[in-house]
Amino acid sequence: MKLLVDADYIVYKSCAGAETDIDWGDDVIMVVSKFSEAMNNVQKDLSKIKQQFLWDTPEMVLFFSDSKNFRKKIYPDYKGHRNRMKPCGFRRVISALSDMYEVIRMPELEADDAMGIYATEHPGNVIVSPDKDMKQIPGRLYNMDEMFTITPEEDEKWHYIQTLAGDQTDGYSGVPGIGIKRAVALFEEHGYTWDTVVKAFADKDLDEDVALMNARLAKILTNKEYDGQVIPWCPTDASDRTNDGAELQATQA
């Protein structure tokens, strides 16, 4: 068994925690960081994770996001509001970890996608991530607090829920006015189908291309959506009207 760790989250948090502001007066404030403190923060977090699996001695695989992101080809404003630079030492810490652990970074993919692909290609491992999006990947998930087992049925449902609810953190809106609870209620009433998704968008005067764009932004990749390059997700339960090859608009209505 391997632990597939969302290391983006851990390293970002650890490096940010090691930063210190130095105020030189006038108009100059400098941010500095102690590399040793950042590394110590990372190692503490990784040790805490391992302690949850004392019955085994699992190998850790650390996953990081690439600097390029295929979702920006679908929607150029994806994560467009995240303008803050990486904290001091971020890249140096990743370089150091590469000498200590297996590190995976896949071209144009986020760490979530790389974990999803690896987990579905190599079942039986455990994804370690606090990100709710990882509920889209069947198998075991440790969210830094509890262990879950995600069934294939549950992962498909969560993808549709995320499509309607959107993700303000990632910068795509889903259906305006619909959050997680409202999305679940709609699906429980009308069924977890693509038709339900399309109708929810249509009720806000948003067409099916916008629904498909949101679904592709929300989808965490598995080995079914990747063969060396991203295979665009398409609904398998769509009615005949769905144009799987439709040109998606670059901006949401």
Image: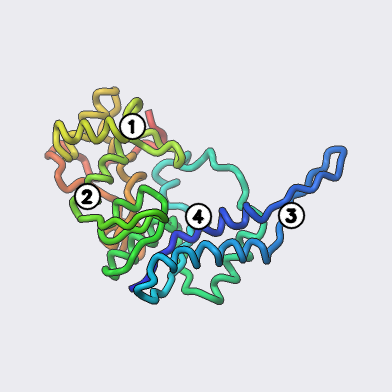
Disc 4 from disc 2: Cα separation: 24 Å
Say which quadrant the N terminus sits in.
Answer: bottom left
Dot 3 or dot 4: first in sequence order is 4
Distance between the Cα atoms at labels 1 and 2? 18 Å
Please name the amino acid that badge 4 sits on. Answer: Tyr
Q: In this view of the protein, which residue sits in the foreground, 247 or 236? A: 236
Q: Mark 1, residues whose alpha carbon is within 10 Å: few (<14), some, or many (≥20)?
A: some
Seen in the image, is 231 located left or right of residue 242? right
Amino acid beneath label 1: Gly
The disc, 3 or 2, on the residue closer to the chain's N-terminal end is: 3
Residue 251: % across, % down: 41, 34
Query: Between marks 3 and 2, how big is the CA–CA gap?
Result: 44 Å
How far apart in space, not on screen, are marks 1 and 4 (Cα)?
Answer: 24 Å
Q: Secondary structure at mark 4?
A: helix
Image quarter in which the C terminus is found: top left
Lower sequence index among marks 4 and 2? 4
Left or right of 241, for residue 227: right
Residue at image position (87%, 38%) is 26
Q: Which residue is mark 2?
A: 154
Give the residue drawn at x 26%, y 68%. Answer: 123
Q: Earlier in the sequence, mark 1 or mark 3?
A: 3
Asked if one can make out residue 113 in the rendered structure from this viewpoint, the answer is yes
Question: Percent position (x, y) of residue 236?
Answer: 17, 48
Marking on residue 9: 4
Return the x and y of residue 107 as percentages of the image width and height.
45, 62
Q: For the residue marked with disc 3, what is the amino acid?
A: Val
Residue identifier under label 3: 32
- Is 175 located above or below residue 92 in the figure? above
Q: Which residue is mark 1?
A: 179
